[in-house]
Amino acid sequence: MTRNSLTRYASQMDRRTLLTAAASAGLSPLFVAFRPARATLPMARLAVRLEARTGHAQLLDAGEPRTSIWGYNGTVPGPTIRIARGGEIEATLVNGLDEATTIHWHGVHIDNAMDGVAHLTTPLTEPGATFDYRFHVPHAGTYWYHPHAHRAMQQGRGLYGLLVVEEREHVAVDRDLALVIDDWRLENDGSIETRSLAGLHDAAHAGRLGNVITINGQPLAQFPVRRHERLRMRLCNTCNARSLELRLEDVAVQLVAIDGMPVPPMALADGRIDLPPGGRADIVVDVTGAAGTLAAVTEVSHQRLVLGHLAVAAGAPTREQRLDTPLLLPSNGVPLPDLRDDPLVFDLRMEGGAMGGMPEIEVHGKRMDLREAARRHRMVWAFNGKADAHDAPVFKVKSGRPVAIRIDNATAWPHAMHLHGHHFVAIQRSTGALRPWLHDTLLMGRRETATLAFVAGKPGRWMLHCHMLEHQMSGMSCYFEVEA
Ligand code: C2O
Ligand code: CU
Ligand code: CU
């Protein structure tokens, strides 16, 4: 082949890849997707040391007191781990706390022994001890890590960090920014309010909601940007219990991935993204504002609260005109369940909590009314009548078989249902808000029913729980078992 025909061949290939990708996502071929994969990227291997310990952070405005927190390597958020898809992570957890801990890798389809769930998949790491987590990251996208022991206390004090798995294909953005968003309940002296930490009152209601919201551990964080710059922003909600309703004002926003998994790019007319605790969204932001202006990042669930700004730098724009093409991320190839193929169907009824009537529930094999369960065992929620059902799997299923979990939220509260080691599609919702997206965490409204479908993945014990940590802690948690 001459050089010319090679080039032509290559560009036809590009176009075809593009068309196939667009067609499979049900899109017109007008999408700027990605350049073809660089032939052979080396499989990255990354070693990281994560010491869980105390530290300080300026969560309140400058000049106000600092907050003593718990963080990985003493910072909040902990270090962002970046690795290419398919790479291997060796993370050494060093426990510098005076209580036992673990690390869970939220959203990663991991080998079960590395899932980090205390008393279920992975040994607790005692104070002063270390544990080596070693695993491959099979999918690109935005994930995160946090303890899975005494969670409301540990994660609530700042133990978490972001795990970014990069596509092996080039993604056409100018920059990649992470926004880890947390809420804190702080005293006037800046310290974390601890009297109610892991408290039963919050547990029976909406969970622990903070009075301060930070981005990347900062109040009113500023992100310098340029006019007409195209950013990929990775949003992660690390709040104990708050569902965030975020808005990016005065910029053009498209949603490109949820919980790490690509979705067909969708322009968000009002720049608004809802994110349950534990959830992530990848968005593409095109900066439209003039040099010297600020574009606010706000939380709007109650009132408009400014969390930070994109500050448009003075000087020349990144390009003459802003980009307005949708950006399609390459698929991760997660298999979608085919429910005609002998699915295992499991019904899950959520009960309990304040204003939920007073069901009798079972705690450690004994039936009792909710009041007694609360007083004696600090349990206020149940799945299928059982609080904290960890003695046995709620079902067993062979790897590769489709599963449909029909959830009935018979409580007066929303819940952020999270599945470990898998992503699911919500194939039915009583609210009708159906989107054919893969999630690992789904916010279910009060009294809502939904069916979550997925293909049973790696063998092992996988948790299904509410990601509102105080709900999980007080009963909203169970697991199932995948058999080889
Ligand atoms: Cu991010 Cu079991 O949790
Ligand atoms: Cu998880
Ligand atoms: Cu909940």
Image (cartoon, helix red, strand yellow):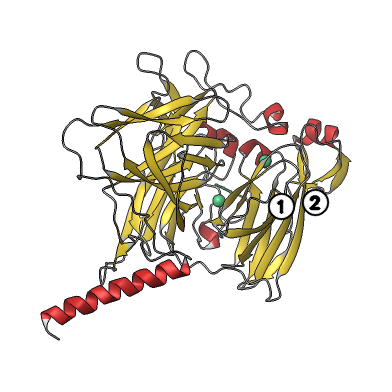
The quadrant of the rendering that contains the N terminus is: bottom left
Residue that appears at 50% across and 25% down = 304
Q: Label 2 CB, ligand 3: below 8 Å? A: no
Evaluate whether residue 442 shows in this view.
yes
Which residue lies under the disc numbered 1?
390
Extreme residue in the bottom direction: 1
Q: Amino acid at mark 2?
A: Asn
Q: Is residue 6 left or right of residue 278?
A: left
Pinpoint residue 293: horizontal percent, then vertical percent.
29, 27
**Camera-nearest residue between 164 and 482:** 164
SS of the residue at dot 1?
A: loop
Task: Check disc 2 and report its element: helix, strand or loop.
Answer: loop
Residue 224 locus on image (x, y percent) = 27, 33
The quarter holding residue 30 reads bottom left
Q: Which residue is mark 2?
A: 384
| Residue 169 visible in the picture | no
What amino acid is found at the position of numbered circle 1 in the picture? His
Looking at the image, in which quadrant does ligand 3 appear? top right
Could you tell me how many numbered marks the image carries?
2
Q: To which quarter of the image does residue 83 belong?
A: bottom left
